[in-house]
Every structure is written in structure tokens, then in C-alpha cells.
Image (cartoon, rainbow, N blue to C red):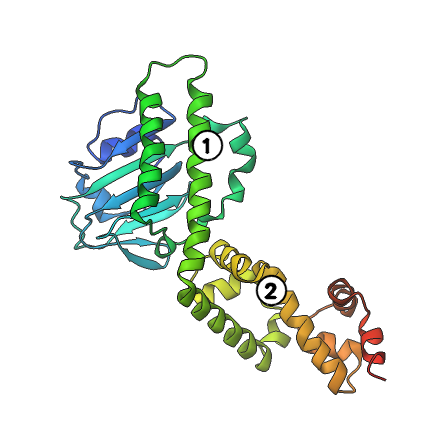
Amino acid sequence: MKTKGLITFDSIGAYLKALDLPKPQHPLVSIIKFKGSKMSPYFLEHKFVYDFYMVSIKKNIKGTIRYGRQNYDFSEGIMSLSAPKQVFSFDESTDVSELSGWGLIFHANFIRHSHLAKHIKKYGFFSYETHEALHLSDKEEAVIETIMKNLEEEYLTPIDTFSQDVMISHIEVLLNYANRFYNRQFITRKHTSDDLLIRLESLLNEYFESNQVQKLGLPTVKYLSFQLNVSPNYLSDLLRTSTGQNTQQHIHTWVIERAKEKLATTSLSVNEIAIQLGFEYPQYFSRLFKTKTTLTPKEFRNSFN
């Protein structure tokens, strides 16, 4: 279906047809081998969205794919993981004639009522931007390839009572390894992480030193991630790896440190400090301060006397 240039693939079969690939063995799950696939022209000329989860390694795409607000170069193989309802598009010059790699596609209904269905939202990488994709080492790619081969073998085996449970178990193992490898990427790309943290601190300083905090209140996770050009989940996961706190906790810690400084060095009342720091309700500021420090703002100030 096409609406204002947006093509929606609401079934796995329709998506595979656009890739000129065979019909899926199962309507709710499929293993794709991209080598030799040819996308229909309309697929390359429009934005598109699909109604299922996808885990893939794509190689040898000449050009860029736009995902959200970012362009990403897929000339090198990377692993990307996306959730339903996310919008993609190709650059006009994109050439997929030598596309290779593989993909796993599964509909939410395939995992419904399973352990994975209850926990799939914990995998934050499903809402990362494409430029936050996972760069695998050769060893890591081999691990993922082995899991995929096990999945493919089960996928091609005649369906029995255990088929779905076994496939879901393999998918969960695949996602757990992706979690592990993303955590490794946060650590090994420390220079990139450090740059992002420096930019975050500068952004917070600028926000509080301007009138934005009085006009808009405390900065939100969505605002900070947008300004830093990363997805909210990616920013929180990176911060959690680097500092042990997610973005919301980081904001609160940052604000409380500013509050301590004002309580110790100015004669401003607690209510005035709360308002300066963007709290609509001073009571909330006092509760947060006590949660973070075990002291009320007044008790903290009195400790200096």
C-alpha cells in the first residue's frame, strides 16, 4: 500500500516479493539471503516501513540508506536491528545490484505469548538509529553466522510441535549476543563515547545557562538525544555503560550537583533554586534532592554552618 510516497509492507510475503525473493516458508518468519536479490523500482523510489522485526547484515550496497534523520553507508558489512513501524528510504544513487548478506524477519505474532515477547522491549537497540548500527569483528560475525545457520536449518525443517519454540529460542540467543556485542562496541569505541559525553555536558551547561530551563523546564531525554543526533535508547545505553546511569538519571544527578552548588554558595531560597533549575513544583525538587543525597535541601545547606 502507498500513501504520500510511503510504502507499507504489512506482510513478510509482500516484502520478499519486493526483493524478488521466493515466498516465505512461514507467514510470520523468514530467513533472507540477499545475494542476487533485485528490488522493485518503487521500493527504491519511495520511503517504506514494514510491520515486523528485522535483524540483518547487509554488504556491498553502493550509496546510502536513510533511516530517521541519518544517512548511513552500507558499503561495509554491519549488523542492524529494527522494530516494526520504522521508516527507511534509499538515496537516489543507491545501487543494490551487488547486495549480499542475510536477514532474519519475524512478526510480533510469531513470538506472542513467549518469554521473548514479554522481554523484547528490553533490547534498546531495536530503536537505535541506523548510524548507531553494530560493527562486528570477524569473530563476532562468525558467532552470529552460526546462530543464523541454526535458525535456517530449523526454518527449513518440516514444522512440528516444537518448531516455533526452538526458533524463538534461537532468536533470543541472537538478540542476547547482539546486546553483548553492543556493550563491547560502547567500550572499544571509547573515543566516540567520550566525545558524545563531552557534547552532552556542553549541551546541559548551555541549556541551564540560557533561559531555556525557565521556559521549558528540565531537559528531557528526547530533547537531549535529538540535539546530539542519537536515539534516546542509544544515549541511555551508552551512558549506562560509561557511568552506570541512564540519561534520565544522568540529568537528575547533574541537576542535583548544580543545586548543591547554589545551596552552598548563594542565599537563594530552596523555592528560588528549584525554579531556576526548571522545576515547576519545588516539592518535587526537594523530594528528588533527598532521594539523591539522603538530606533535604535545607539540611544540606545547614551542614555548611
Count the numbered circles shown: 2
Residue in view at x 35 percent, y 38 percent: 144
Q: CA distance from mark 2 to mark 1?
A: 33 Å
5 to 70, vertically: above or below: above
The reply to whether discs 2 and 1 touch (Cβ–Cβ < 8 Å) is: no
Instruction: Name the residue furthest left.
Output: 97
Camera-nearest residue between 239 and 39: 239
Give the residue pinned by disc 1. 108
Q: Secondary structure at mark 2?
A: helix
Q: Counting other residues with Cα less than 10 Å from the Cα at mark 2, is it few (<14), some (14-19), or many (20 or more)?
A: some
The N terminus lies in quadrant: top left
- Residue at coordinates 18% horizontally, 39% vertically from top-left? 40
Q: Few, some or many C-alpha atoms within 10 Å of disc 1 (few <14, some 14-19, many ≥20)?
A: some
Q: Nearer the viewer, residue 198 or 86?
A: 198
Q: Amino acid at mark 2?
A: His
- Examine the rendering and report whether any part of residue 15 can be seen: yes
* Residue 196: x %, y % from top left: 45, 68
Find disc 2 in the rendering and name its residue.
250
Residue 12 occupies which quadrant of the picture?
top left
- In the depicted view, which residue is nearer to us: 76 or 144? 144
Query: Left or right: where does residue 34 sit relative to residue 301?
Result: left
Where residue 45 appears, as percent x and y from the top left, is 22, 48
Give the quarter of the figure containing the C terminus. Answer: bottom right
Q: Nearer the viewer, mark 2 or mark 1?
A: 2
Splitting the image into 4 quarters, where does residue 262 fall? bottom right
Q: Earlier in the sequence, mark 2 or mark 1?
A: 1
Query: In the rendering, at what x and y percent does residue 286 appear?
Result: 78, 68
Q: Residue at x 53, y 73 (%)?
A: 201
Task: For mark 1, give the secondary structure.
Answer: helix
For image coordinates 42% across by 44% down, the residue present is 178
